[in-house]
Amino acid sequence: MKRLLTAKLLQTLAPWRNAPVWHVAFSGGLDSTVLLHLLASLPNIPPLRAVHVHHGLQAAADAWPSHCQVICDSLGVPLQVLRVQVQPGASLERAARDARYQAFSAVVGEGEVILTGQHRDDQAETLLFRLLRGAGVRGLAAMPVHRPLAAGLLVRPLLGTSRVELEAYAGEHQLQWIEDPSNADPRFSRNYLRHRVLPALTERWPQALSSLARSAEHLSEAQGLLDELALLDLQAADQPSPFPWLPLPSLALAPLRELSDARQRNALRHWLNPLTRLPDSDHWASWYSLRDAKGDAQPVWRLADGDLHRCGERIWWVPSTWSEFSDATLSWPDPQNPLELPGNGRLRFIGNAPEGPLVIRYRQGGEIIDVPGRGRRDLKRLLNESGLPGCVRGRLPLLYQGEQLLAVPSLSGLWPMPADGWQLHWMPQTCDQGLS
């Protein structure tokens, strides 16, 4: 049994044999105990470390770090115990999982790998659980063998191994592990599937677990093909923005319109996946409303972690955190030095700054500005001419001298520099290029 599992493990982990460190997510349960024991016996591998996350959700868990320490000491593997706070929510399972992965993200350094003990039976359980929730192909692909995590990678090297094989290995090597009492509580959805549903399925279809895991592999392959199609479809829409200084992901709308509705959804899912939790089927009507709105409209599609805005023939992703800035008036006592705008980047002058006192304010409506060669112009009309997305206009810093609106960061040369040759340059937050 050991030789078989070792061969599987070495084959799965071959791409990461040169990683700086292998961390093992060590709960002390059967899966992670077998994984740690196997890894500790392998020659010529990266430095091995164990990480135990203490959720503090039950009294029994207080003894688990000590158990894990004993195991790690016997194997010569250093152990790090991380205590986390589980945020209350609708699903305790999900909240605990989120806290656990946040802890893992804090541990994994550049290029490092964290190894978790999920096995084939967990894969089958995940597929069934997501199927009952109405997941699409991406969700039904279940758990990938590896995925990015923080600056490193999360790898699940036991997904091709059954729980029966892990139990046989543990028995052969007389391993001791923790049995989490909460794993027997059928009030948790996964436990209900594990203890009530899956046994009934395997009684009727003995190969049910392996068949479900195999289906997850097929669905993962299908998702890979959908991702390839999405990349092809997004190439035409990924046209340069007219505002390259603006640190917001955006796409041209016209190429997306040429696709079928199904391909539009597939392309947008791929594009949005790293940006936000994806919408369920019922919420895609908002995409069609945004897509089909009149050209002068500025519709918004509210999503879990931000909003999708449309401005003219372009869509812009605005994360929830990007809108958090202070619009309080700021004095600029030393215009020779850049001015930091709380949550909104920084301002500086190109050329000699005008005489003070200078202050920065944000739009209230009705602003008028003198434009060289064009006279007094309504700022709203100028911004409409520029095509600047509406979601950015409220963040645009306005330079005042007393009550006079002296300058606005110039937009793509829409209006020329003042006669005395200075220009206001805005570098929005997280943006490498400025606006001048």
Image (cartoon, grey):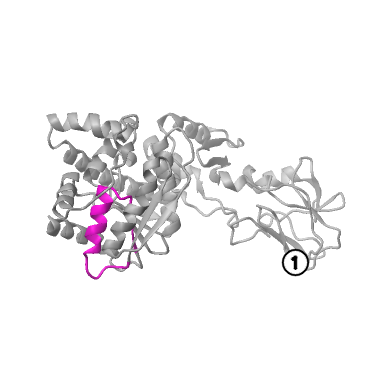
Q: Nearer the viewer, residue 238 or 331?
A: 331
Q: On screen, 69 above or below 193? A: below
Pinpoint residue 80: horizontal percent, then vertical percent.
39, 59
The count of marks equals 1
Q: Which residue is drawn at 86% across and 58% down?
A: 357
Q: Which of 73 and 320 is in front in this view?
A: 73
Circle 1: residue type: Asn
Q: Does the magenta stretch include residue 36?
A: yes
User: Which residue, given by chain and number where applicable, does mark 1 sit on?
Assistant: 337
Residue stretch rendered in magenta on the structure: 22-47
User: How many neighbours does mark 1 have within 10 angstroms: few (below 14), some (14-19), or many (20 or more)?
Assistant: few
Pinpoint residue 11: horizontal percent, then vertical percent.
20, 60
Q: Residue at x 26, y 53 (%)?
A: 33
Pinpoint residue 182: horizontal percent, then vertical percent.
33, 37
Q: Which of 253 and 270 is in front in this view?
A: 270
Q: Quadrant of residue 38?
A: bottom left
Q: Give the side of residue 256 with respect to residue 406, left or right.
A: left
Residue 259 visible? The answer is: no
Q: Give the side of residue 26 with respect to residue 363, left or right.
A: left
Quarter of the figure that contains the C terminus = bottom right
Quarter of the figure that contains the N terminus = bottom left
Q: Nearer the viewer, residue 188 or 172?
A: 172
> SS class of the residue under badge 1?
loop
Q: Does the magenta stretch include residue 298?
A: no
Q: Give the side of residue 303 with respect to residue 49, left or right.
A: right
Q: Which residue is drawn at 40% across and 44% down?
A: 97
Residue 105 visible? The answer is: yes
Pinpoint residue 62: horizontal percent, then vertical percent.
39, 47
Q: On screen, 83 above or below 279? A: below
